[in-house]
């Protein structure tokens, strides 16, 4: 079958156009033979996103960005990206722009949500977010430090100003005089110390006194060691036991339990003793006045006189 030149030219042109279309989409990371889900996200700043930027889920590439454009009014940026159909997530998933490396390149990641909401479909607009990059994190950390450093510098400047205002010529002169007086006082103390050392070395009596004090201290140390070695615990225990026994004896005496206690606490024995003493006094008095009543001595057997009590005795 022979084709005319015009048909061959048309086939060649269509083939070239098809190859160009396929190559162009390949360069844009779009697979012409695969149908992907298309999603949108709106940002107030594109953060340098470009067509062909990879789209990832959990760090795994699932698609690419195929369009970045300004919305009417030039206030927001619309980003259109493709995700392979096999990856599904809910409408509440977030399309987050993040910093891919230290060089500052930006990428787009889908933070998938599996919260039971409807599955996101091709053409839906997802929620958007921009993650803080390394530069922003460093700035957040450095800003408080910078403020503290500035505050310290201002404080140090104030201290230097105050220090300079204090160290005027008059104050410097007074400070110099104070230092000189302090040096003079130190010299005087040094001289006094040398004088005391000289006196101690020349005064034998004072040296002897110190030696006696040293001997006394040694004797006291020996006595202290002897007291430590002595069995004072048993002595104190015996003394405590004796005091306890004495307390028991005194308590019994107060209660009148023994003869001595009865003598102390009761008046009967005391009264009996007083009566006996009175009778003895009367007897002695009668013996002194009438000795013949008690001593009888007669060679001829004189008749005994009958005893009659005196008036004082009858009383």
Image (cartoon, rainbow, N blue to C red):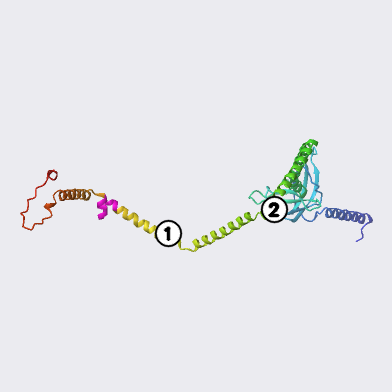
Nearer mark to the viewer, of 1 and 2: 2
At x 54%, y 60%, the residue is 219
Number of marks in the rendered image: 2
- In the structure shown, which secondary structural element does the residue marked by tag 2 occupy? helix
Dot 1 crowding, Cα within 10 Å, few <14, some 14–19, many 20+: few
Of residues 146 and 64, which is closer to you in this image?
A: 146
Residue 232 within the segment the image draws in magenta: no
Residue range (magenta): 253-264
Magenta region, main secondary structure: helix
Q: Which residue is mark 1?
A: 236
**Residue 167 appears at what percent x and percent y?**
78, 38
**In the image, farthest residue toward the right:** 5
Q: Which residue is mark 2?
A: 198
Of residues 261 and 169, which is closer to you in this image?
A: 261
> In the rendered image, which quarter is residue 60 located in?
bottom right
Quadrant holding the C terminus: top left
**Residue 6 appears at what percent x and percent y?**
93, 54
- In the structure shown, which secondary structural element does the residue marked by tag 1 occupy? helix
């Amino acid at each position: 079958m022979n084709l005319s030149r015009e048909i061959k030219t048309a086939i060649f042109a269509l083939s070239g156009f098809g190859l160009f279309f396929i190559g162009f989409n390949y360069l844009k990371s779009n697979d012409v033979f695969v149908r992907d889900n298309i999603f949108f996200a709106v940002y107030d700043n594109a953060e340098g996103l470009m067509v062909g930027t990879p789209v990832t889920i959990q760090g795994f590439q699932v698609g690419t960005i195929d369009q970045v454009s300004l919305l009417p009014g030039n206030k927001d940026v619309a980003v259109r990206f493709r995700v392979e159909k096999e990856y599904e997530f809910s409408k509440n998933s977030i399309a987050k722009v993040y910093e891919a490396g230290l060089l500052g390149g930006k990428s787009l990641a889908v933070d998938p949500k599996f919260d039971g909401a409807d599955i996101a479909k091709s053409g839906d607009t997802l929620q958007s977010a921009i993650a803080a990059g390394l530069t922003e994190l460093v700035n957040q950390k450095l800003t408080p430090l910078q403020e503290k450093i500035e505050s310290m510098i201002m404080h140090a400047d104030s201290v230097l100003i105050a220090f300079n205002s204090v160290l005027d010529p008059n104050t410097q002169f007074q400070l110099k005089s104070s230092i000189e007086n302090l040096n003079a006082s130190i010299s005087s103390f040094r001289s006094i110390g040398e004088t005391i050392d000289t006196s101690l070395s020349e005064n034998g009596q004072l040296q002897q006194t110190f030696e006696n004090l040293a001997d006394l201290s040694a004797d006291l140390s020996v006595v202290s060691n002897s007291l430590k070695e002595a069995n004072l615990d048993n002595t104190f225990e015996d003394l405590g036991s004796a005091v306890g026994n004495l307390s028991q004896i005194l308590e019994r005496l107060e209660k009148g339990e023994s003869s001595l206690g009865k003598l102390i606490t009761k008046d009967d024995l005391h009264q009996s003793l007083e009566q006996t003493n009175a009778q003895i006094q009367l007897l002695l008095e009668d013996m002194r006045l009438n000795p013949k009543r008690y001593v009888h001595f007669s060679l001829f057997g004189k008749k005994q006189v009958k005893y009659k009590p005196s008036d004082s005795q009858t009383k």
